[in-house]
Image (spheres, rainbow, N blue to C red):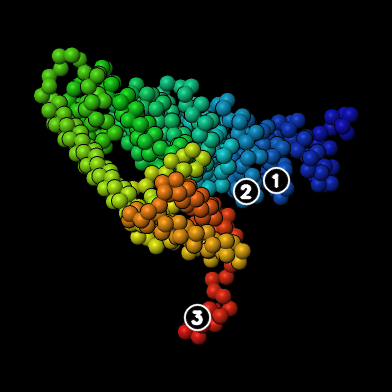
Amino acid sequence: MISHADFDSQLFLARKLKDVKTTLDIYFLQMKYEEALEIIALQSNPEYFYKYSPILIEHVPIELVNLWIEREKYLSPEKLLPALYRCQQNPKMVAAAFQYLKKIIQGSNASKPVHNFMITLLSRYKTEELLTYLTGFGYDKSKVPYDVEYALRICLEKEELKQCSVFLYCIDGLYDEAVSLALTIDVDLAKECAKRMKDDRDDSIYEFFEQKQDLALEARRNVWLKIARHIIEVQKDVVACIDLLKESDDALKIQDVLPFFPDFASIRHFKEPLCKCLREHSGKIKVIQRQMKEATETAQQVRMMSEKLKKKLVPFVIVHLCKRLVIIRGSDHCSLCDSLVMDRPFYAFNCKHFFHRDCIEKESIASFSKEETSEYRILRDKEKLLQKMLDDAGKGMSQPLKKQREIREDLAKIRLKLSDMITGECLLCGVAMIKSVGTAFYSAEEYSDELSRW
């Protein structure tokens, strides 16, 4: 039958044997596409749709699409894309493609490639609907179902899709490019883009910078500055530029736009912005003056305290580690007792923790071994004895100068040893603090007492 091209007999036999593939091949050879579609409609296997749809879409597009929609739950839109890609040859096929795509997208059953193809069709055949389609999914790039970069590339190829390109630039966070392109269309559109920049809370581009807010403000200022320059140099509208200062929500100042004005522009338009600028600078100057005054008062207090401590012969300790100087203010507090650190002799660390000598001594001794505790007490007693000898010499008791010098040297050495024992590291951020994580808050006796109180 095959060798004699007896299609009727071959078709009859294929139908009797339920040989679907042979039946469809014969119908396609005879160009009987409606009959082939009827055979496919009777099948439960979706592979027949995927294999033969690229051929059928060129001849029975409306009927095929209606069958796709009828079998929507069982068919994958992505696997039908090869057939849809052919729907760019005549209006009937394009209409069929739009019918199916709109149905799938409305049912939220469309993947990114399907949305991308919809954007391609709209950009070619329904450019007036593309902006509505894009804006319908919002400004959040992480939530839009299409590929923003792909859509932007498609839109940039056509002059009539400039507004779509502006929208996509905003979604992509490219506000500088969005404003530049918007200015070729409409100033109000450029303003909307600049305002969107403030509403956009995704500032991940600045997350690696410490001065994140300053960088974001500077980026906003540059965008608004571009609009202001366009208004002044292209539109020659001084009043509109002054109004722009308010619209920018303080991103722009009068001093930012003054360089763009012509040399002989009337100053009457600048009166209010200039006065506002002067008031702001006046306020900043007052703040700086107040800070300077506070700094001067603090310095005087430190100076007076230093003189007072010198007269009392109380050691004033400033720790100098790794060639770095620690500055102590008069308002700083002891990290243990929380009283003013300069009330008594103290130690300072580079980590900005300050401790009174007696406070750090008490805490450090608690963690000493028996040998260290014994050694520390011996050195402390020697220190007190040498200090008493110096005090007696200061009261007029006879003591050779050479002997006094030796006492001072011995006293300095002992104090250095004592200091090394209790200030080897900061109590709050040194290794000892890390090791104390496993230490119980109470001893066995203290725990029993505490438990009985509860």
In the rendered structure, which amino acid carries the disc numbered 2?
Arg
Quadrant position of residue 402: top left
Q: Which mark is residue 450?
A: 3
- The residue pinned by badge 2 equals 71
**Disc 2 from disc 3: Cα separation:** 75 Å
- The residue pinned by badge 1 equals 46
**Disc 1 from disc 2: Cα separation:** 9 Å
**Residue 87: x %, y % from top left:** 58, 30
In the rendered structure, which amino acid carries the disc numbered 1?
Pro
Relative to 174, say whether 303 is above or below. Answer: below
Crowding near the residue tagged with mark 2, few <14, some 14–19, many ≥20 C-alpha atoms within 10 Å:
some
Please indicate, yes or no, whether residue 368 appears anywhere in the rendered image.
no
Q: Upstream in the sequence, badge 1 or badge 2?
A: 1
**Residue 98: x %, y % from top left:** 52, 36
Q: Upstream in the sequence, badge 3 or badge 1?
A: 1
Crowding near the residue tagged with mark 1, few <14, some 14–19, many ≥20 C-alpha atoms within 10 Å:
some
Tags 1 and 2 touching, CB below 8 Å: yes
Relative to 56, say whether 159 is above or below. Answer: above
**Residue 223: x %, y % from top left:** 34, 28
As helix, strand or loop, the secondary structure at mark 3 comes to helix
Q: Which mark is residue 246?
A: none
